[in-house]
Structures are given as C-alpha cells and as structure tokens.
Amino acid sequence: MIYPLAHLLGGLVLLCAFSLLSQRRLAAMISIYQLEALILSAAAAWQGYAQHELSLYLTAAITLVIKAGIAPIVLRRIVHNFNLIRAVETAMPVGVSMILGVGLIGVAVLVVLPTTINSVGLTREDLAISLSVVLLGLLVMTTRRNAVSQVIGFLSTENGLVLAAIGMPGMPFVAELSVALLVLLAFMVVGVFLLRIREHFDTLDLSGIEEIERRGR
Amino acid sequence: MSFWLLALGFAAQAAAFLPLLAAPVIGFFGKPMHGAFANVVLCFLVFLLTLAVFRHPGGGLIHADELGMMFGVLTSFVALSTSLTNIAFVRSEISRMSVRRWRVYHAMCQVMLGTTILGLYADNIGMLWVAVEGATISATLGVSLPRTATALEAGWKYFVLGGVGIALALFGTMLTYLAAQPVLGPGLQAMSFAALEAHAAHLDGALMTLAFVFLLFGYGTKSALVPLHGWLPDAYAEGPIPLTATLSGLMLNVALLALLRFRHLMQANFLALGGALPPGPFLETLGLASLLLVAFSLWRRRDARRFFGFSSIENSGIAVFAFGVGGTVAIFAGLLHMILHGLIKSALFQAFTRAAAMRGGAGPGQYGFSHLRGMMASNKYLAWLLVGCVFFLTGLPPSGLFATEFLIISQTVQRVPILSLPLGAGLLLCAIAIIRQVGPLGFAPPPKNTMPAKAGRLLGVVYLHLALVVTLAFAMPPLLFVALSNIATGLQ
C-alpha cells in the first residue's frame, strides 16, 4: 500500500517536471509548477503517515503554503505587473530539450539503481525519480533565457530535492527545514532581483548578460 | 565572572551566532559610520572567541575540530583587519550609497563572517550545507548592492550558478546520509563528520562515490573550480570590495575544506576496499583544469579585481590538486597554501581599496591597472605594500607560497609524475602573468594630476599580514607545525 501510492505521487511530480520543458508560456509554467508543488506536498504527507513522522507532515504543510500557495501568487504578480510577453523564448527548440530530458531521466535511473542495490526498494526508486526531477529542473534553467522561467526551473529542482529528502528513512529535519528556508530566502532575493533588473533592462530577457563578457572583463 | 566562564564554554557556538544575531540590528539601525565601528567591535569579539575555541571546542552540531579551529582563527583575523580598513573605505565612499544600503552592507559583512565560522565549526554535514547556503545569499545581496546594470548581472549570475551548486551539494549530502545510515542508524549520527570518519570503511562505497560526485560539483561551484568558476571574477569585480572580494574569499576555504573532508571519507573507504572509487583523479583533474585555464586567461585582464579574482581560482585549483595528490606532505602543503593565500589575498585587496580611494574612488570599475599605475607617486608606503602583495602572490621566495608550491610539486613528482609537467607549466605561466603587473603598478609614470596622499595609520595591519606570511612559511612555530602535520596525517 505504501509503495504504489508513494510511487504514483513521485511519478506525478516527475511528469510535472517533464512537462515544464514543453511549455512555451510563462502562465502555463507557473500553473504546472503549482501542481507539482501540490503533489509534492501530498507525497510528503503520505510519507509522514507511512513513517509516522511528525516532521514530514510539517514539511508537507510548508510545501503547501509556501511553494503551492505564496510562490505562484508572487510569480503571477511579477508576470502581470511587468506586462511580460507571455511567450517563453527558448534557447533551443522544445523538441530537442524534451529529447535531452528523456536522456537525463535515463541517466538518473542508470546511475542510481545500480549504486543503491543494498538500500530499501522504496528509497531506490524514489531516489531515481527525484534525481530525474533535479536534473530536469537544471535543464529548464539552461534552456531558457527568461529570468522568470529560470526561477521556475530552480524551484522545480528544489522540489526534486525535497522529494529525495522525504524518501530518506529517518532523515533528520535539518534538511527539510533548510530547503524550506532556502525557498523563502531565494524568493526574497529573486524578488529584489526581478524588480531591479526590471529597472535597468526593459525586459526580463537575460541575453544582455553577455554585456560583461564583451567588456573584456 | 561566572557568566563569562559560561559564555566561554559555548565559544564555538557564540563565535558563529554572535555575528548572525547582530546582523539584523546593524541592518535596521544606525548611520554608516556606526555600522563600520560596530563591525570592528564584533569582529574583535569573534576573534577572541575563535581563540577561546581552542579551550572549548563546543559539542553536538557545532563541534570544532583542529582544522576548523585553525581556519576559524584565520577567518576572524582577516575579518578583523578588513573591518579596520573598512572604516577608511566607508569614509571615502559614504556618499555613493544610501543609508539603507550601507546598513544592508554591514549586516551582510556580519552574516558572511558568521556563516563562514559556522561552516568551519560545523560537525554536521547538513549544518555545513546551511552555512554555505547562507553565505551565498549574503554574497548575492552584497554583489548587487551598487544597483548598476553590471552589478545586477553579476549578482544574477552568482545567484543562478550558486543556487545550482547548492542544490547539487544538498543532493550529495543526502546521498552521504543514505550511505551512512545502514551503519550509523537513522538520525543525526549519520550526518556527523566525526562519526562518518570513524566508520568510513563501512560506508556504502558505491553510494559514497555517487555522493562525492554531487558534492564535488556542489562545493566545487562554491570554491570556483574550473567548469563552475564563472561567477567568481564577476562577483569579485562588483559590489563593495571588502565584502565581495575580501570576506567572500574566506568562504572559498569552507568549500575547499568540505571537499578535503569528503575526500578523506572516500579515500579511507577506498583503502578499506569499501567499494568507493579513489577520489584523487577527480580532484587532480579539476584542480589542474583550474590552474591551466587561469594561466591562459590572466594575460588579458585589465581590471585588477577581476585579475586577482582569477588568481583566487588558481589558488583554489592548486589546493584541490594537492588534496587530490594525497599523502601527509601534499595535504599539509595544500592547507598551508590555503592559509597563506588567504592572508596575502586579503592584504592585497585591502591595499587595492586604499589605492583606488587615493585615485578618486573605491567603487567598482575604478580598479583598472592603467588607472592604478605608478602608485609610488601617490604614497610610497602603500606602493611598497601593493608591490609586496603582488610579488608574494607569484610564489617566488621570500613568499611563503614558494614553500608550499615547492612541496606540492615535489610530491607530484613522487606520486603522479605524469602531472608534474602541466602543473609546473601552469604555475610558471601564472607567476609570469602576475609579476608583469608589479613594475607598472609601483613604478610606472602615474596618470596626470596625481597628487601625493596619506595612507592612514591602519594600513599597518595589512603589513602584519605579509609579516605573518613570511613567518609562517619559513619560521613556523613548532606548535603550529605539529598541529598542522597531525591534521594532515589524520586526513591523508
């Protein structure tokens, strides 16, 4: 009973992370991220029930409130206030990045499964799924030029980390707490950044970042 | 009296958390000069506390081992001298930022100091990760403070790369826990460095290897090893220089020591046939790549802060390479190299801050070599200091770096002879690129309208750094020598 449901939720998180790659519009990316965080929160609560850990329920609550609640609201507000063009500029075609994504999932499975032969089955597959989510988030960060979509990629990576942490048997709460903290802090930092970047550049397009390179360092 | 004794008992915790607790106070109240003086007082207190840690190393999550204690003293000493020269920096730059930004700046200096000490003293791999993460956030805020377009770009770059590094390091941390959990049981014990070291032979070798790869790229980002170094030159070049160049340089040490400790776990596991891959080749490759990249990119830099940012990458690379070579002598040399480089580089940046202030302003973008040439005409004490620091950085005697680089090369010849040629070539190219700057910086004809200026008495502190570098390398106190050798033997 524990296995199928935990795997189902983990798989759904992975599916969300993967479909982030295919989205061209910021609003859709934010919605998918929100769904991902929602499923993650359910996964954490389920693990809390299965492992009888109060701290995992707390993780679920933090995820629900901050990642599935506040974060998407702020992101939507940024998109709305800055009147961003809704289309995402991708540095490479969606098809190519999805093929790369499939490759990354394959790598994650091939790397994790042989190295964790001695661990419990649940942990092994959870780890493979969460590593895939982490790598897919990084892929989103590298294939997008837009600051908001890079932030969403980073948040998706964070979701992968939390998914790994809740699957670890008896992992002390330090990790969960710090992940939640990181998200909160990252948002503060990112919020400041986005506002200021807006002041200086007309769009949130970061291709202007090559400015530094051109000026001969 | 008894209160103070009690406080001393928690010296390790106090050294880490005093700056962190003081940061919000500095961040919300006071004029810029108040912040600067509060900085001095706090850094002095932390310096005393890091000395007290030798008697009371703490316990539980924050338990300083000898390595942590030694680098703790180094960190607080550099922070103290930076806070002293920071007074002059604030005086000359006070009109360039608003009061609120000055408050944030001084608060971030304290956060940086506190998280660095926390990272050095943490016995828990989760705590170490939290410290590195906190330092990244404070550095990002610091870099973006001037709010110019380039500062924001540099800050964003730092945030993205640093965030990725932090994410990878956390994944590695969790894998380490998973590898240790069957042996040490679930709970905090499986995240303690001391317990991990004691049971290194019984950890799950294959999982440790996977964890090490993530940790290598995670903490490697923070120590600016080559494929992941992109943030460092930009971050060093932007933002208020005492925070983004001098203090954040100390953070490199935390990441490097983390790599050293995890390397030790891997090596011990490998030697006990626990199934882990030998960590040496990983570290040697990244270290050598860093050294060689810097050897070729130093030649075209026109901005002093970027130039010496690249030189920090070089020195991270040398230290990591030494750790990769392994053995007591190479690790001893690597650690000493980190200590000496920390002292020289912080002295150098403090001298540069003063030099730029004499030439019209110490903000970012005013550190071009052409702008700072011929410092003899401005002030000869400062000029000799600058020349001394830059010369010391080349690694020619009487610089202490000569001794450490010599040890590293001789160990490389013994253990991995095939790498000694690229190592030697890289060191030589870097040394030549750096020494080319000595002459123009000190003795070339200065720009027009250069007036002599006063150096300020506090510059004496910076001379102390150089005196320490020579002493530590060529007349090392026996006590320190024994302590450092013991550490190196324990971590070989």
Image (cartoon, grey):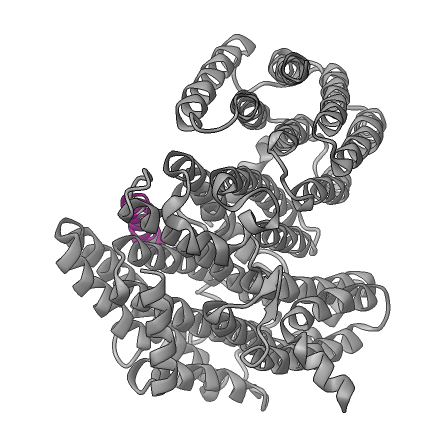
Camera-nearest residue between B289 and B339: B339
Q: Residues in magenta?
A: B280-298
Image quadrant in which the N terminus of chain B is located:
bottom right
Percent x, y for residue B69?
A: 51, 72
Percent x, y for residue A106?
A: 45, 15
Give the mark count.
0
- In this rendering, does residue B359 appear at all? no
Q: Quick check: is B214 in the magenta stretch? A: no
Camera-nearest residue between B65 and B475: B65
- In this rendering, does residue B30 appear at all? yes
Percent x, y for residue A51?
A: 70, 30
The dominant secondary structure in magenta is helix
Horizontal side of residue B435 vs A165, given as left or right: left
Camera-nearest residue between B492 and B74: B492
Image quadrant in which the C terminus of chain B is located:
bottom left
Q: Residue at x 51, y 24 (%)?
A: A124
